[in-house]
Image (cartoon, helix red, strand yellow):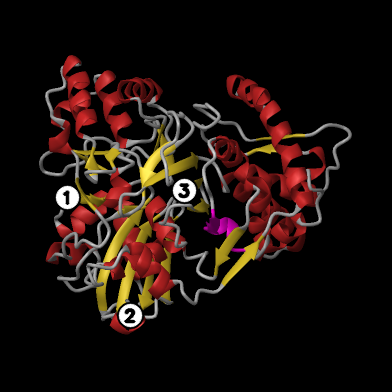
């Protein structure tokens, strides 16, 4: 298939991320032509990390404002993966949205992992449902549907209760042969919950599963109204995907041996496998590409949030001294300043754990900076240590894949950590000991990937997603590749050993404060 057969003018990708709701419009050369966003954040209410669903619609309308949406031929919705949205038969929300940040389902996740002999992370929808049943929460008797944020928004806009297979793989385990939820595990789940007097059947309450390339409904009049009439009813939708699937698509990482790292509020790597892992690892999630290929995922709850908090303190300090507001250019300057730091960060260690971390087995986190009298405590080393901390837990998970002999032919970075050229790319290459590619569209990330998946539903059905991306989208992509520098690798190795040894101090901090 060549670009001559592309038959659309514009496609729209929308993603509800952890810090921004963003909409990206692409043309038929797959170039972003406009974008808009809305900043939001989770709140911690009654010991639950959540977002208001009312703000979903406010944010979507703000992200679409000012864009020319008169010729959108296909569109799609993406959002932060996992979590728990439970509804009754009339689609009334039963409890506040429980996001991926929550680490409140440890008992259920462990029970399901043992039952299935398949790792069930705490943030997966099925772990939340099981925990709610175990806790005998009042709402469970009313549950008719559970879904994710992307699945909910897609349903509200199209009336179709379905998700893409990559998103579905963060709800319930997928059988890679049937490209659907695993039947044996569904039966086991029903049996377990029946023992706890849950009368529902899991098949009845999960969204349907669709693979990339299939149309997943069309924008309804009601859906167009929710978007303020900015789009016309009848626009076809791609299956809604999670930020993992759109990240794979945006970085052309959907073939075996390819991988990508998405780094923003959270950080996760996605490595497409050519063979199964030898055993179950609680630190590794098994999910899929948007077409159903098995993927090993290392997901870490904490990435840049702690860094952002420090930068805000520094901005406030500069404003205090100068009497002027400081622009976000300070991020670029601080990132670049970190390059002057020592490769091991001068014996300064930062823990960026605002939330818990399943990879290192923390249900809660406490941000910390640790140094001693001999540490080289200067700005460059402090910022470099903060940036190292954003990918340190990821490195611990990636070491497991390395020990398994997982093949990684290419690793592509995207997300906010890579907006400043070279810096995040250089540190990730050192952490993962592999060349790291960053594309010109790296900052667009998930919504760009969702726009590509929307375009794919308009393509020839005989063309695979890998072919579509390779031959149409990325054949002339502008990329930069950085190989790991030995000094950086040695420095990061020293840092990560300190980091792992200091996790006992992190545990003590959780117990103390």
Q: Are marks 2 and 1 in contact (CB under 8 Å)?
A: no
**Residue 512 occupies which quadrant of the picture?**
top right
Q: Label 1, on which residue?
A: 161
**Residue 16 occupies which quadrant of the picture?**
bottom left
Q: Look at the image and tell me in which quarter the N terminus lies.
A: bottom left
Q: Is residue 262 above or below residue 206?
A: below
Q: CA distance from mark 2 to mark 1?
A: 28 Å
Between residue 187 and residue 139, name the one nearer to us.
187
Q: Which mark is residue 6?
A: none
Judge depth for marks 2 and 3 and give the one in front: 3
Q: In this rendering, would 105 be left or right of 145?
A: right
Q: Look at the image and tell me in which quarter the C terminus lies.
A: top right
Q: Is residue 31 above or below residue 211?
A: below
Judge depth for marks 2 and 1 and give the one in front: 1
Judge depth for marks 1 and 3 and give the one in front: 3
Q: Is residue 412 magenta?
A: yes
Q: Secondary structure at mark 3?
A: strand
Q: Is residue 465 magenta?
A: no
Residue 124 placement (x, y as % from top left): 35, 36
Mark 3, Cα crowd under 10 Å, few <14 / some 14-19 / many 20+, is many
Q: In this rendering, would 194 be left or right of 424?
A: left
Q: Label 2, on which residue?
A: 68
Q: Secondary structure at mark 1?
A: loop
Using the rendered image of the protein, determine whether residue 164 is visible from the camera's viewpoint.
yes
Q: Label 3, on which residue?
A: 270
Span highlighted in magenta in the image = 409-420
Q: Secondary structure at mark 2?
A: loop
């Amino acid at each position: 298939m060549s670009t001559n057969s592309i038959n659309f003018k514009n496609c729209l990708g929308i993603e509800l991320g952890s810090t921004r709701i963003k909409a990206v419009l692409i043309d038929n050369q797959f170039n972003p032509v406009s974008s808009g966003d809305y900043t939001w954040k989770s709140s911690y209410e009654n010991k639950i990390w959540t977002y208001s669903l009312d703000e979903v619609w406010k944010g979507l309308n703000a992200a679409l404002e000012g864009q020319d949406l008169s010729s959108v031929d296909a569109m799609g919705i993406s959002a932060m993966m996992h979590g728990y949205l439970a509804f009754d038969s009339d689609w009334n929300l039963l409890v506040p949205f429980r996001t991926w940040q929550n680490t409140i389902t440890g008992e259920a996740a462990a029970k399901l992992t043992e039952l299935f002999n398949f790792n069930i992370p705490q943030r997966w929808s099925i772990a939340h449902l099981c925990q709610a049943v175990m806790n005998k929460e009042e709402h469970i008797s009313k549950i008719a549907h559970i879904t994710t944020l992307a699945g909910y928004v897609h349903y509200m806009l199209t009336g179709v209760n379905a998700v893409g297979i990559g998103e579905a793989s963060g709800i319930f385990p997928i059988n890679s042969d049937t490209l659907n939820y695993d039947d044996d595990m569904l039966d086991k789940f029903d049996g377990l919950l029946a023992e706890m007097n849950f009368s529902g059947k899991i098949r009845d309450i999960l969204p349907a599963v669709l693979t990339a390339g299939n149309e997943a409904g069309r924008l309804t009049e009601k859906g167009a109204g929710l978007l303020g009439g900015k789009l016309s009813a009848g626009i076809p939708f791609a299956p809604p995907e999670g930020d993992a699937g759109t990240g794979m698509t945006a970085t052309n990482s959907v073939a075996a041996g390819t991988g990508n790292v998405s780094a923003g509020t959270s950080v996760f790597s996605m490595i497409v496998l050519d063979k199964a892992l030898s055993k179950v690892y609680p630190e590794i999630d098994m999910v899929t590409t948007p077409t159903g290929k098995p993927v090993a995922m290392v997901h870490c709850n904490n990435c840049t949030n702690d860094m952002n908090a420090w930068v805000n303190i520094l901005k406030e300090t500069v404003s205090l001294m100068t009497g002027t507001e400081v622009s976000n250019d300070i991020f670029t300057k601080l990132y670049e300043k970190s390059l002057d730091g020592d490769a091991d960060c001068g014996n300064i260690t930062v823990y960026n754990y605002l939330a818990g971390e399943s990879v290192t087995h923390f249900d809660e986190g406490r941000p910390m900076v640790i140094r001693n009298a001999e540490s080289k405590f200067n700005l460059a080393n402090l910022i470099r240590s903060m940036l190292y901390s954003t990918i340190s837990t990821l490195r611990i998970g990636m070491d497991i894949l390395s020990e398994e002999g997982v093949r990684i032919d290419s690793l592509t970075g995207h997300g906010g950590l890579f907006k400043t050229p070279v810096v995040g790319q250089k540190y990730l290459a050192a952490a993962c000991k592999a060349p790291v590619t960053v594309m010109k569209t790296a900052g667009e990330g998930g919504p760009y990937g969702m726009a590509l998946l929307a375009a794919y539903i308009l393509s020839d059905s005989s063309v695979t997603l890998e072919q579509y991306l390779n031959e149409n989208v990325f054949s002339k992509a502008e990329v930069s590749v950085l190989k790991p520098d030995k000094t950086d690798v040695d420095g990061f190795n020293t840092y990560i050993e300190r980091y792992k040894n200091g996790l006992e101090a992190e545990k003590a901090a959780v117990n103390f404060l």
